[in-house]
Every structure is written in structure tokens, then in C-alpha cells.
């Protein structure tokens, strides 16, 4: 999927208006619960379901499956079934998904600078390191 050309854009980036439909749609998509963590986990490359589940503490298999389907429907994730025994399913970010790299890095930098770690996340991180 190719990025939109300038004629197709809504025109919100020229000036920061109070409301921009494109921005709203993007934030609703990547801001859904667990989606940012899933995308960040996938930035390192192709992954299997269990790989993603193991690096995102607290994420249920049901919700991971749901989010991967949503991201696939949006053209952000590519699902590949590998014919083997047992059947293997790989997930990878598409070009559209890889284009979120700078966004995710910027949000990560902002979070490290401005947000204090929550006790819940600190506990999950400590458990994962054991």
C-alpha cells in the first residue's frame, strides 16, 4: 500500500487546526489498548504470535489475536502462513507499519522523559526479567 499523495491528504499538517480527521483516525488506531506495545515489539522484524505474547507482559492471547487482525485489516501487519508441521504463522510489519517507527520512537522518548513508571508496569518488567 502506497502513502497518500498530497492531493489525497485532508490538509491538516499545513497548520495545526483544533481537529484533524486524519490525525484522529491515526490516534484511534494506534492508541487502542495494547496496540502500541504490539507495534513496538514487532519493530525488530518478523515475529510469531508467541514471540509477541512473551515480550508484552499482561497481554492476553485473545486480545493479541484481536489486535493483530485489526492491524492486518488496516494494512499495518502482514500475516504469513508457513506450510510446515505444525503450521507456522509469522507476522511482520508492512511498509505502512514500518513507517510508524519514528512515531513509536518519539512516543517512547516522550514517555521516558515525562512519565513516571507505574508500580504495575515496574512489577511486570521485574517479573519478565526473572
Image (cartoon, helix red, strand yellow):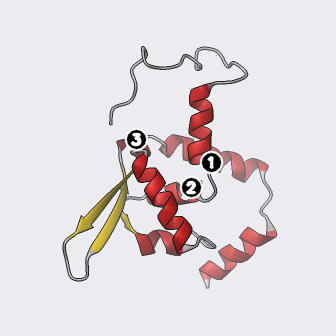
User: How busy is the neighbourhood of tag 1: few (under 14 within 10 Å), some, or many (20 plus)?
Assistant: few
- Relative vertical location of residue 25 with respect to residue 86 in this rendering, above or below: above
User: Residue, x 80% and y 70% (percent of image)?
Assistant: 119
Image quarter of the C terminus: bottom right
Look at the image and tell me whether residue 47 can be seen. Answer: yes
Local secondary structure at mark 2? helix
User: Residue, x 61% and y 42% (percent of image)?
Assistant: 28
Tell me the residue that label 2 is attached to. 35
Where is residue 103 drawn, in percent x and y?
55, 41
Quadrant position of residue 63: bottom right
Side of 27 relative to 81 (left or right): right
- Relative vertical location of residue 112 with respect to residue 121 in this rendering, above or below: above
Where is residue 126 drawn, in percent x and y?
68, 78
Quadrant position of residue 86: bottom left
Dots 2, 1 in contact, CB < 8 A: yes
Say which mark, if any, is on residue 31.
1
Tell me the residue that label 3 is attached to. 96
Where is residue 34 drawn, in percent x and y?
60, 59
Amino acid at each position: 500500500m502506497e502513502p497518500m499523495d498530497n492531493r489525497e491528504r485532508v490538509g491538516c499538517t499545513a497548520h495545526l487546526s483544533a481537529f484533524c480527521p486524519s490525525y484522529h483516525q491515526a490516534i484511534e488506531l494506534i492508541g487502542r489498548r495494547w496496540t502500541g506495545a504490539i507495534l513496538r515489539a514487532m519493530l525488530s522484524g518478523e515475529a510469531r504470535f508467541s514471540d509477541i505474547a512473551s515480550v508484552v507482559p499482561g497481554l492476553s492471547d485473545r486480545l493479541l489475536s484481536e489486535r493483530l487482525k485489526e492491524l492486518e485489516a488496516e494494512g499495518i501487519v502482514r500475516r504469513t502462513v508457513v506450510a510446515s508441521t505444525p503450521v507456522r504463522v509469522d507476522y511482520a510489519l508492512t511498509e505502512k507499519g514500518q513507517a510508524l517507527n519514528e512515531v513509536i520512537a518519539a512516543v517512547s522518548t516522550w514517555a521516558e522523559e515525562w512519565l513516571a513508571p507505574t508500580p504495575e508496569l515496574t512489577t511486570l518488567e521485574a517479573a519478565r526479567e526473572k
